[in-house]
Image: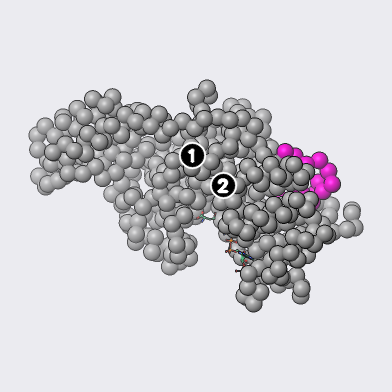
Amino acid sequence: MDEKPVYLGILGLGTVGSGAVKILQQSSADITQRTGRRLEIKKVLVRNPDKPRPVTLPKGVITTNPAEVLEDPEIDIIVEVMGGISPAKEHILQAIRSGKHVVTANKELIAKEGRELLTSATNAGVNLYFEGSVAGGIPIVKSLKECLAANMIRTVMGIINGTTNYILTAMTENGADFAQVLQEAQRMGYAETDPTNDVDGRDAAYKLAILASIAFGTRVRVDQIYTEGIRGITAEDIRYAGELGYVIKLLAAGKEHPGRGIEVRVQPAFVPRLHPLAAVGGVFNAVFVQGDAVGDMMFYGRGAGDLPTGSAVVADIMDIAKNLGGKVNPACSCYTDKPVIPLEETRSKYYVRTAVLDKPGVLAQIAGAFGEAGVSLSSVIQKGHGMQPVTLVFVTHEVKEGDLRRAIEKIRFLPVVDAVHNVIRVEEGR
Ligand code: NAP
Ligand code: HSE
């Protein structure tokens, strides 16, 4: 065993930083055995040194001066768990330039600035690992990059935001509305005070940009991902989904259509009750992967939290420590350039919930508008009779999204239609 420890500099000691430190301290002996090196936390950067922390570090380790961490020549690995773009990006670039390896859990930074950071790391001959940035404790980044490297990945599709999955699960179980459950989730600490990034799908889009870039070997930018959150999902939609044999999930989906390009989107979708993703409840995450050689697989676990995310961060640190001084793998896995297929060109079944006048000939008018746009219907449900308006729910066969939109624009303006309340993709899971 090498006597000199591997020195760590940690940027941030919040939820993830504290989780990683806890693991490094509690499992220190086993970590040393497994890596063949002792890991020592030399410096930790925070904003407020007086804040109470759930971990205890020796005197002099905590600092508010970034230079004490980034310019310490003994530090081998910088662990960035402070979040945000700036100054995290500048700190990582400085670390890379100084020949330090980097581990980060920062999904926003990797999704938005990954190309520059990964290229810099490769050019500098250092590792930049980011397992904790997607789905917390689930080892999906390394699985895609290494364990499934022999496969052409056709689908990577998941529930990768715990907050929205908690809300949708509670809505499904209690029949409650979105606003009511969100308030409850905030009170219990499951949802942040400002839940925008989560409920509007942005957090999942960052993670999908990372997953799809690795899975399909092409750089997927966040702005190329169609992103829709769950604010528009009502208790009524969830009830109809149940009646039709589905549950509603916020799905982050990446699919490759060989020869055409890739499809990347984050949106609420009907998932068949028997699909493995349908059983993923509460704050749990899961990623479903289809490879041409391996077939279907699903990765399931905790997508956030101090110890689950700390588990991914510490595993990355150990990986680097084991191979310190050895060969550095290319950081970036985007070696092709595949086009993103416009959403209008993608195909799916759809659920459409309308409010219409209850009188003879209405169904024929609406079915006619669907038909004129080339949209074929699979089923229709009408609930109630005699009241005005009544709910009419349609499920289409698989159609092009562009055709469906044309039909909806026509239907919206039919005099017999009071409102088109919701249109939701029905994902058959492939
Ligand atoms: P957090 O609890 O807000 O902690 C951030 C830490 O960074 C705090 O210790 C803060 O210092 C420090 N910090 C922030 N800006 C700083 C600055 N300019 N200078 C010095 N220190 C600064 O955040 P987190 O939840 O641990 O998340 C960290 C990263 O992990 C983010 O990129 C997040 O997206 C990612 N992530 C989080 C989770 C999760 O479950 N929370 C899961 C996966 C990935 P003070 O403590 O002094 O304020
Ligand atoms: N806010 C995220 C979620 C956790 O709700 O899944 C951090 O990735």
Query: Quick check: 413 left or right of 120?
Result: left
Crowding near the residue tagged with mark 1, few <14, some 14–19, many ≥20 C-alpha atoms within 10 Å: some
Q: Quadrant of residue 77?
A: bottom right
Q: Which mark is residue 224?
A: 1
122 vs 83: above or below: above
User: As rendered, which of 69 and 203 lies closer to the eye?
Assistant: 69
Crowding near the residue tagged with mark 2, few <14, some 14–19, many ≥20 C-alpha atoms within 10 Å: some
Magenta stretch, residue numbers: 314-330
Q: Is residue 38 visible?
A: no
| Residue topped by disc 2 | 112
- First in sequence, mark 1 or 2: give its number: 2
Query: Quick check: 89 left or right of 260?
Result: right
**Residue name at image x 16 percent, y 36 percent:** 414
31 vs 343: above or below: below
User: As rendered, which of 15 and 72 lies closer to the eye?
Assistant: 72
Q: Specify the farthest residue to the top.
A: 259
